[in-house]
Amino acid sequence: NAAAVMEELIAFGGREFINMGSCGGLQGFGTFLCDKAIRDEGLSHHYVRPQKFAYPDKDLTNKLENYLCKHKMEFKKSATWTIDAPYRETKAEILRYKKEGVMTVEMEASALFVVAKIRKVKIASAFVVSDVLGEDKWNPQFSTKHVKSDLRKLLDVSLDCLMKK
């Protein structure tokens, strides 16, 4: 659905996008700026040949990083794991990606990065961890004050980034 909406926004003239929202954490809570996404979803392979990673636009990602710093928002840069099947992460996959240093898991980034590449538009992604996937325990905190507050801050920063040249 996110890719379909993005395709329509591009058709209406959209040229810069920030994909932001909540995600699962593999290494703990926090805010994360995405520098690449593992393509473990079903859409991107219909656009380009299979590869492990999809990448955001470097310039827009750097601009968003500068705005996160300007707004004094704490964050880390990290790869994300995109899997579009809800709650289907396995213990073995979680352990493998943790060992690779992947910090987040979500459902759209790699697909959106590929759509942006094919359509020659810019995209960056940032996430706030709303739940942590442990090997033996799940720690959901979707409605907590810190998650809601960080999502509001990330939205403000993202809008500021897109609105200023």
Image: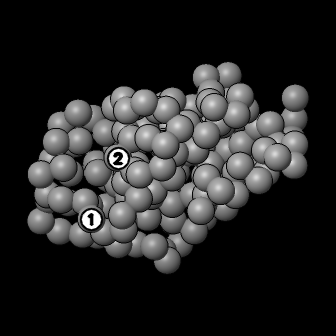
Quadrant where the C terminus is found in the figure:
top right
State left or right for residue 56 relative to residue 160: left
Label drawn at residue 40: 2
Name the N-terminal-most of marks 2 and 1.
2
Q: Position of residue 154 (x, y in %)?
A: 64, 52
Q: Position of residue 89 (x, y in %)?
A: 25, 60
Residue at (35, 72) in percent of width and height: 140
Q: Position of residue 63 (x, y in %)?
A: 70, 28
**In the image, farthest residue toward the bottom:** 143
Asked whether the viewer can see residue 95, the reply is yes
The three-letter amino acid code for the residue at tag 2 is Asp
Circle 2 residues within 10 Å: few <14, some 14–19, many ≥20? many
Instruction: Determine the secondary structure under disc 1.
Output: loop
Q: Position of residue 98 (x, y in %)?
A: 22, 42
Label drawn at residue 88: 1
> Which residue is more in the foreground, 28 or 49?
49
